[in-house]
């Protein structure tokens, strides 16, 4: 019997990533909750689900809940979900701040339910293969790490103000929205932890149609990683010149790799490159076994979000069956939030070095 999933939030991202990804993975969407009734009804009609007005009303119809709402409601909906003994699939960032992220993590653990944070780069074979290269020793000892997540969705100053640029619903700006992905990817493919950061933030276009931007457009950040390794990271939601992209480069004593999961167009629009210490970067093939050994084939021409969430959905459903927390779980969401909070604190103090501590 398929795992029954309720969707909270029926906006664009739920429509193109959460719902289709979970269905592709083998789940059944059986209930929809949204503050916009017409959107809930549209999604419910597509999946032959019921429309509900609360988590309590949703609970009898589902085994798990996917939360695809604005950042300020992730924790409140998450706490209500785990209170009913339901597994939870939460969009990133896990919360607006570390205190709330920890609260949800603790509640889910106490309830004994499965939790996943949708750090979507982990749902791409590029990332899986990069981790294999790291663990094989091909890079040798790590020398330094650098990375960026540059997006264009607010590059035009005429783009109207959206909730992501407002502090109450979003918390931080590019730092939380993009940084959650970049920091998780950098940690995962390097095997290193962030220990302290020095960050500077800026707002490129403060005045927009509809109001004033209240959080960061861009972040420039230095980091000290475990083993006294240096890191350099850049975030921007106002980057022009091309579609959004995420990239992490890890340099080692034996070789180096550039990791670029797909974040635009379709799933094949990503890549992995490796260079020996005395060579140049060359593309690394991504064998079918990366998905085949997991009993799954995913079409390369899928929209990148649906592609990534199909793999995240598969991991979530597998975790429900086995009772073992998935990767990325809520813990990884908390860890990303720890870096986000430290960077935000540093930026408020003009780049003062700030410890990253749970």
Image (cartoon, helix red, strand yellow):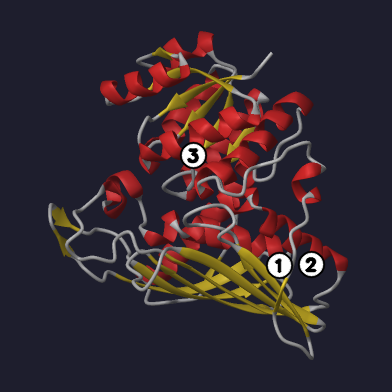
Q: Which mark is residue 134?
A: 2
Element assignment for label 1: helix
Q: Earlier in the sequence, mark 3 or mark 2?
A: 3
Residue 220: x %, y % from top left: 43, 75
Residue at (47, 48) in percent of width and height = 93
Which residue is at a point 42% across and 31% down the rendered structure image? 76
Q: Return the residue nearer the eye: 95 or 29.
A: 29
Residue 112, compared with residue 54, is above or below; it is below
- Camera-nearest residue between 28 and 345: 28
Q: Nearer the viewer, residue 304 or 253?
A: 304
- Based on the displayed image, in which of its 4 quarters is residue 86 positioned? top right
Q: Quadrant of residue 151?
A: bottom left
- Give coordinates of residue 2: x percent, y percent: 65, 17
Percent coordinates x, y for residue 116 in the rendering: 61, 38
User: Disc 3 vs disc 2: which is toward the camera?
Assistant: 3
User: Percent x, y for residue 68?
Assistant: 43, 35
- Disc 3 to disc 2: CB gap under 8 Å: no
Q: Residue at x 45, y 58 (%)?
A: 178
Residue appearing at x 47%, y 19% in the figure: 47
**Label 3: which secondary element:** helix
Q: Earlier in the sequence, mark 2 or mark 1?
A: 2
Whether the residues at callouts 2 and 1 have beta carbons within 8 Å, the answer is yes
Q: Which residue is mark 1?
A: 190
Q: CA distance from mark 3 to mark 2?
A: 29 Å
User: Are discs 3 and 1 less than 8 Å apart at CB?
Assistant: no
Question: In the picture, which quadrant includes the N terminus?
Answer: top right
SS of the residue at dot 2?
A: helix
Task: Specify the label residue 17 is tagged with.
Answer: 3
Residues at marks 3 and 1, CA–CA distance in whole angstroms: 27 Å
Nearer-N-terminus badge (3/1): 3
273 to the left or right of 68: right
């Amino acid at each position: 019997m398929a795992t029954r999933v309720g969707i909270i939030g029926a906006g664009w991202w739920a429509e193109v990533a959460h719902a289709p990804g979970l269905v592709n993975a083998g789940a059944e969407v059986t209930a929809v909750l949204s503050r916009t009734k017409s959107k809930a009804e549209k999604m419910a009609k597509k999946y032959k689900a019921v429309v509900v007005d609360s988590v309590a009303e949703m609970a009898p119809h589902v085994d798990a809940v996917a939360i695809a709402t604005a950042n300020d409601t992730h924790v409140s909906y998450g706490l209500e979900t785990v209170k009913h003994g339901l597994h939870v699939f939460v969009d990133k960032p896990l919360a607006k701040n570390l205190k709330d992220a920890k609260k949800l993590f603790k509640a889910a653990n106490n309830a004994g339910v499965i939790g996943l944070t949708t750090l979507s780069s982990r749902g791409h074979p590029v990332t899986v293969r990069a981790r294999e290269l790291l663990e094989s020793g091909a890079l040798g000892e790590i020398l330094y790490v650098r990375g960026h997540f540059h997006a264009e969705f607010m590059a035009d100053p005429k783009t109207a103000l959206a909730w992501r640029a407002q502090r109450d619903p979003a918390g931080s700006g590019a730092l939380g929205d993009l940084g959650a992905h970049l920091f998780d990817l950098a940690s995962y493919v390097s095997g290193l932890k962030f220990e302290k950061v020095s960050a500077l933030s800026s707002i490129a276009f403060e005045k927009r149609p509809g109001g004033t931007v209240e959080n960061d457009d861009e972040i420039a950040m230095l980091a000290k990683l475990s083993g006294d390794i240096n890191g350099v990271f850049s975030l921007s939601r106002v980057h022009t010149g091309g579609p959004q992209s995420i990239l992490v480069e890890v340099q080692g004593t034996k070789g180096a790799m550039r990791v670029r999961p797909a974040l635009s167009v379709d799933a094949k629009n990503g890549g992995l490159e490796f260079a020996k210490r005395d060579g140049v970067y060359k593309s690394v093939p991504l064998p079918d076994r990366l998905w085949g050994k997991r009993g799954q084939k995913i079409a390369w021409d899928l929209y990148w979000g649906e592609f990534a969430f199909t793999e995240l959905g598969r991991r979530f459903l597998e975790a429900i069956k086995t009772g073992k927390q998935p990767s990325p779980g809520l813990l990884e969401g908390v860890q990303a939030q720890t870096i986000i909070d430290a960077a935000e604190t540093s930026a408020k103090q003009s780049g003062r070095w700030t410890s990253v501590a749970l």
